[in-house]
Image (spheres, rainbow, N blue to C red):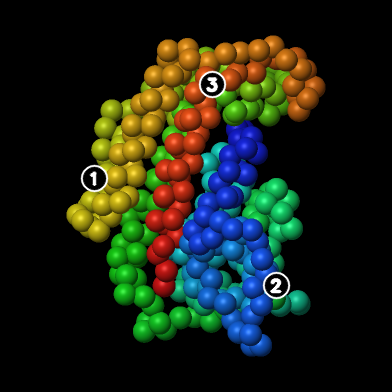
């Protein structure tokens, strides 16, 4: 059963503002100038659009899932990652850049930190994203690129602490947590693709019913039951503090706010604070129920603010 989010969240999260919220205006680079790009600055489409076409450089690690043929790489700002990150319930890359080599060249894999240099290419609009061969979506990429392995003295002062975060694999768990938070706040926008059952019968796709949402959250449910288990958020906080008792107070606060938000969203679901309407669903070519959460916009606004804080925290770690 494959779930997908509507494009509303994709468009909303694309507007994360790390540097600037003003209208895009191209910045002219001095001859030979190479812009230093960061994962945090890459959160702002408006900023990226200003430097579209310019030479940029950024430090990171190759994800081990980068294509074996070296045709491009997934670049991330932490090591030991086997898969690109996506924004919850979308196919849009998060904290991951796609980097393409020069024509007729390929990349060799390395697990060491690298410095990438290439030309920035930005999608023409926020809602006109690039899509790669795996179906991942992203609004910019680095092309005509090359990389060099960074020396120890070129790494930042927080390198050791950042390595501990990667080794603890806490970021993967935080992404999983946000998948859960997103679902509780917007379960009505999740949908099931058309499928064939065990008897070979074809079924139309559909948007989740409230009974589906509750099932996914039950202890023996099929999808998000982990988040409703006792001590779930406390366990994440304990793992963060085990890395360093005080260095990540802002992240701990973010997790605590996520706990409060999910409790609020779950109460909305259990109290039946939603409506449903029978309507023709163009994407499925059939008539079916579509749910609306009475406080859905407020829940998603709170969720997006928390995810923005998390994305900024994650993107702030630079080598």
Q: Position of residue 261 (x, y in %)?
A: 38, 32
Q: Position of residue 219 (x, y in %)?
A: 38, 22
**Where is the C terminus found, in terms of image quarters?**
bottom left
Q: Residue beneath label 3, please?
A: 293
Residue tagged 2: 53
Of residues 258 and 113, the one drawn nearer to the viewer in this rendering? 258
- Left or right of 241? Residue 168 is right
Q: Residues within 10 Å of mark 3 (few under 14, many from 20)?
A: many
Q: Is residue 24 left or right of residue 96?
A: right
Question: Quarter holding the N terminus?
Answer: top right
Identity of the residue drawn at 36% across and 26% down: 263
Image position of 257 with respect to 77: above or below = above
> Which residue, given by chain and number where applicable, does mark 1 sit on?
238
Q: Is residue 261 visible?
A: yes
- Asked which secondary structure carries label 2, the reply is loop
- Residue drawn at x 62%, y 44% is 11
- Residue 200: name its quadrant: top right
Numbered circle sitting on residue 11: none
Q: Residues within 10 Å of mark 1 (few under 14, many from 20)?
A: few
Residue at image x 52%, y 55%? 17
| First of labels 1, 2 by sequence position | 2
Kindly indicate the quadrant of the structure image that contains residue 102. bottom right
Q: In terms of secondary structure, where does tag 1 sit?
A: helix
Residue 95 higher or lower than 209, as above or below? below
As measured in the structure, the alpha-carbon distance from the residue carrying label 1 to the one carrying label 2 is 44 Å
In three-dimensional space, the C-alpha distance between marks 3 and 1, rounded to whole angstroms, equals: 33 Å
179 over 188 or under it: above or below = below
């Amino acid at each position: 059963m494959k779930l997908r989010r509507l494009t509303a969240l994709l468009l909303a999260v694309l507007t994360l503002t790390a540097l600037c919220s003003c209208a895009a205006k191209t910045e002219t680079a001095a001859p030979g100038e190479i812009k230093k790009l960061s994962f945090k600055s890459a959160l702002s489409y408006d900023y990226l659009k200003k430097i579209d076409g310019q030479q940029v450089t950024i430090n990171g690690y190759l994800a081990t899932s980068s294509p074996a043929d070296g045709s491009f790489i997934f670049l991330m700002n932490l090591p030991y990652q086997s898969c690109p990150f996506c924004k919850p319930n979308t196919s849009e890359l998060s904290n991951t850049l796609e980097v393409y080599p020069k024509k007729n060249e390929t990349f060799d894999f390395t697990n060491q930190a690298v410095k990438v240099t290439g030309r920035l290419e930005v999608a023409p609009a926020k809602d006109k994203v690039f899509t790669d061969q795996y179906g991942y979506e992203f609004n910019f990429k680095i092309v005509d690129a090359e990389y060099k392995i960074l020396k120890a003295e070129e790494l930042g002062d927080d390198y050791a602490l950042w390595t501990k975060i990667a080794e603890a694999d806490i970021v993967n768990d935080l992404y999983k947590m946000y998948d859960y938070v997103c679902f509780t706040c917007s379960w009505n926008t999740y949908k099931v693709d058309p499928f064939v059952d065990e008897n070979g019968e074809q079924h139309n796709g559909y948007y989740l019913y409230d009974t589906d949402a509750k099932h996914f959250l039950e202890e023996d449910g099929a999808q998000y039951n982990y988040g409703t288990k006792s001590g779930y958020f406390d366990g994440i906080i304990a793992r963060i503090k085990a890395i360093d008792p005080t260095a990540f107070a802002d992240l701990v606060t973010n997790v605590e706010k996520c706990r409060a938000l999910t409790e609020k969203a779950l109460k909305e679901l259990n109290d039946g604070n939603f409506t449903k309407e029978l309507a023709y669903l163009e994407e499925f070519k059939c008539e079916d129920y579509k749910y609306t959460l009475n406080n859905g916009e407020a829940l998603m606004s709170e969720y997006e603010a928390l995810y923005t804080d998390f994305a900024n925290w994650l993107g702030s770690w630079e080598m």
